[in-house]
C-alpha cells in the first residue's frame, strides 16, 4: 500500500476478540487495516463537523430529514453483519 508522505509508526493494543472477528486477509496486513479504518473515522469526523456547523446555523435536523440516512445506516450494518456471519461460517 502506498502512503502519502512518510509513514508514522505507532504502537497500538488490539483486543483479541476484535482480531478474531477480522478476516484472514485483514489480519495478514494489520497496517493496511488500521489505515483503512482510520481513513473511515477521519471521514466520519469531517462529516460530523459539517453537520454540527449546519445545525449551529439552521437548527437540528428533523426526524423526517434523518429518516433516509438512518435507513441507509441500518441497511449497511445489516449487510456488514451478514458478511461477517458468512465469513465465520466459510
Image (cartoon, rainbow, N blue to C red):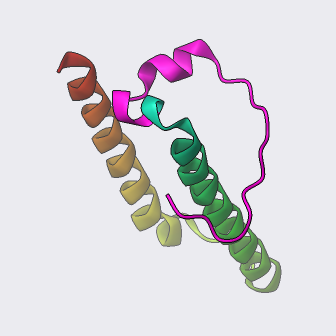
Total numbered labels: 0
What stretch of residues is rendered in magenta?
Answer: 1-26
On the image, the x and y values in percent for residue 29 come to 48, 38
Name the residue at the bottom extreme. Answer: 57
- Rendered view: 34 above or below 7: above
Q: Nearer the viewer, residue 34 or 8?
A: 8
Give whichever of 85, 71 is nearer the camera: 85
Q: Quadrant of residue 62?
A: bottom right
> Residue 77 in magenta?
no
Q: Position of residue 16 (x, y in %)?
A: 58, 13
Measured along the vertical axis of the image, is residue 84 above or below residue 77? Answer: above
x and y percentages locating residue 69 in the rendered image: 45, 64
* Left or right, residue 35 beside residue 79: right
Give the image location of residue 56, x and y in percent.
82, 78
Tell me where residue 39 sits by quadrant.
Answer: bottom right
In the depicted view, which residue is nearer to us: 11 or 42?
11
67 relative to 55 in the view: left or right: left
Magenta stretch secondary structure, dominant: loop
Q: Quadrant of the C terminus?
A: top left
Name which residue lies at 63% across and 61% down.
44
Which residue is found at the position 36% from the left and 29% from the top?
23
Amino acid at each position: 500500500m502506498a502512503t502519502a508522505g512518510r509513514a508514522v509508526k505507532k504502537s497500538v493494543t488490539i483486543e483479541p476478540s476484535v482480531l478474531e472477528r477480522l478476516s484472514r486477509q485483514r489480519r495478514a496486513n494489520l497496517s493496511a487495516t488500521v489505515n483503512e479504518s482510520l481513513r473511515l473515522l477521519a471521514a466520519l469526523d469531517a462529516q460530523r463537523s459539517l453537520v454540527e456547523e449546519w445545525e449551529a446555523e439552521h437548527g437540528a435536523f428533523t426526524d423526517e430529514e434523518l429518516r433516509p440516512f438512518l435507513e441507509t445506516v441500518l441497511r449497511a450494518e445489516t449487510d456488514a453483519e451478514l458478511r461477517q456471519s458468512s465469513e465465520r461460517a466459510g
